[in-house]
Structures are given as structure tokens and as C-alpha cells.
Amino acid sequence: MTMNLPLGFHHSLLVRFHEVDSMQVVHHSQYLVWLESTRWAFARDVLGIGPTDFDKLGFHLPVVRAQLDYVDSANLESEIVVVMHYLLQDKTLVSFKYRAYDQKTGKLVLRARTDHALVSNTTKKLLVQWPNRWQEVLGQALEEHPEYFMQDGAK
């Protein structure tokens, strides 16, 4: 089956043996790992930011909220595509919306959202305004890939 996936940043994963339980169904905790993998692929491929680059930017983005709705099960060797959007908002908060699909069947397996605070890596305090360099990086990505971004709204 050829899927017509929604627009957004796409990250493909293959369900591996260590991610499933004795029934060969993906354990619920693995979905958080998939979301993190998708965020890092987005940071690398779209923003040009690697794990050590956040030190240079002067802040980190710890997860402060994760909401996952398990819609259907994924099984061993399922090919999964996570479609992610960066949610644009006025608050100094970085948020992502995710939808995970089984690539062969087209079924939706997960809806999720994560929210991330901006924390100074020197003072360890919350930042209340966007760092200039982050605004530059995000502005360039938004210009080059507008389909990866959407206005924040209901999940």
C-alpha cells in the first residue's frame, strides 16, 4: 500500500526486537524514544543542530510535558513513519506535535505532543525570551521548510 502521509517532517523507524513485549507488540515506553529520535533528526537535518550545539546556543530544551495517545499497536518489524510539526507559539516554549503511522498499512498508531522549556545552561534558570541565535536558526528553517511548522492549537 502506498501511503499519502500528511505534510510535516518525516522520520522512519523499524520496530526492533528489544522494543516489543512477549506478544511482539511495541512496549508503551518505546514511543517516547521514537519521539526523541524524531526530534534529534529534525534538529540535525532541518536546524543544523547536533547534541553538543545546544551548549553553544546557551540553553537546553528539557521535556516538561509529554502527552501520548496510543491509537493502535505496532508490532515487531513494523515500518513506522513519525510525522512531526514544530508548533509556533508566542510563549517561550518549544512544542512538537507527532503522528506515527504504520507505513505498510497506513494505520495511525500514535498521536503525541511534547513541550520543552528553554533553560540557560549557565544559570539553570528558565529563559523568558527567545535567544537571538535560536530565532535566526528557526527563522531560516521556517523559510526553507514551512510544511514542518504549524500554529499551536489543540493536539
Image: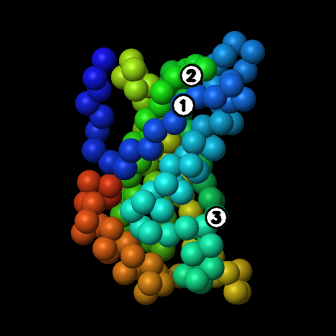
Q: Earlier in the sequence, mark 1 or mark 2?
A: 1
Q: Residues within 10 Å of mark 2 (few under 14, many from 20)?
A: some
Position of the C terminus, as image quadrant, is top left
Give the amino acid type for the residue marked by disc 2 in the picture: Glu
Q: How far across and how far down the image is residue 12, in percent?
A: 46, 38
In this rendering, would 3 be left or right of 116? left
| Mark positioned earlier in the residue sequence (2 or 3) | 3
Q: Amino acid at mark 3?
A: Pro
Q: Residue at x 39, y 76 (%)?
A: 137
Camera-side residue of 115 and 51:
51
Residue 112 position (above or below residue 54): above
Residue 67 visible? The answer is no
* Residue neighbourhood size for the residue with mark 3, other residues' Cα within 10 Å, grouped as few (<14), some (14–19), many (≥20): few
Query: What count of labels does the image hold?
Result: 3
Which residue corresponds to mark 3?
A: 62
- Give the answer, above or below, for where 93 lies relative to 96: below
Residue 77: mark: 2
Q: Earlier in the sequence, mark 1 or mark 3?
A: 1
